[in-house]
Amino acid sequence: MENSSWDTIGNAFFARAIHTELRHWRRLLVVNSAFNRDRTEAIVRWVFGTAPERGAELHFGPVTGGGM
């Protein structure tokens, strides 16, 4: 989780810059609502890149329990 951004692109960018790059995390689980899943997945894959040499293994999961 990060609190430096105002939108999904910023969320993905700062999550990468502040958390994953510094800690060398390579397996990531992105959790959000089913309503935003496709858009969020496209943005996160764009920000993190999907090529193996970039090193990010991305997984996406839904929020359970009713959401907002």
Image (cartoon, rainbow, N blue to C red):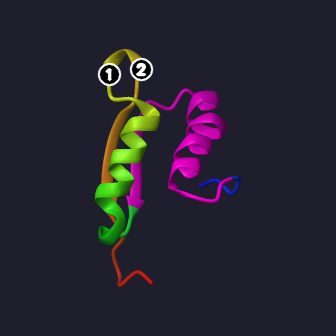
Does residue 29 sit above or below 63 in this rendering? above
Mark 1 and mark 2 residues within 8 Å of each other at the beta carbon: yes
Q: Is residue 31 left or right of residue 16?
A: left
Q: Specify the amino acid type for callout 1.
A: Ala
Say whether residue 45 is magenta: no
In what element is the residue under mark 1?
A: loop
- Assess disc 1: are there few (<14), some (14-19) or many (≥20) residues with their C-alpha within 10 Å of its C-alpha: few
Q: Looking at the image, which residue is at 31% across and 52% down?
A: 60
Does residue 50 sit above or below 8 in this rendering? above
Label of residue 12 in the image:
none
Q: CA distance from mark 1 to mark 2?
A: 6 Å
Does residue 65 sit above or below 29 in this rendering? below
- Assess disc 2: are there few (<14), some (14-19) or many (≥20) residues with their C-alpha within 10 Å of its C-alpha: few
Q: Give the camera-side residue of 10 and 54.
A: 10
Where residue 21 sits in the image (x, y, percent)? Answer: 58, 29
Q: Which quadrant holds the N terminus?
A: bottom right
Q: Which residue is mark 1?
A: 51
Q: Specify the amino acid type for callout 2.
A: Arg
Q: Residue furthest top?
A: 53
The residue segment tinted magenta is 5-31
Q: Looking at the image, which residue is at 44% across and 30% down?
A: 26
Q: Which residue is mark 2?
A: 54
Q: Is residue 32 left or right of residue 5?
A: left
Say whether residue 28 is magenta: yes
In what element is the residue under mark 2?
A: helix
Quarter location, residue 45: top left
Where residue 19 sits in the image (x, y, percent)? Answer: 61, 39
Q: Is residue 44 left or right of residue 8?
A: left
Where residue 41 sits in the image (x, y, percent)? Answer: 34, 50
Q: Looking at the image, which residue is at 31% across and 71% down?
A: 35
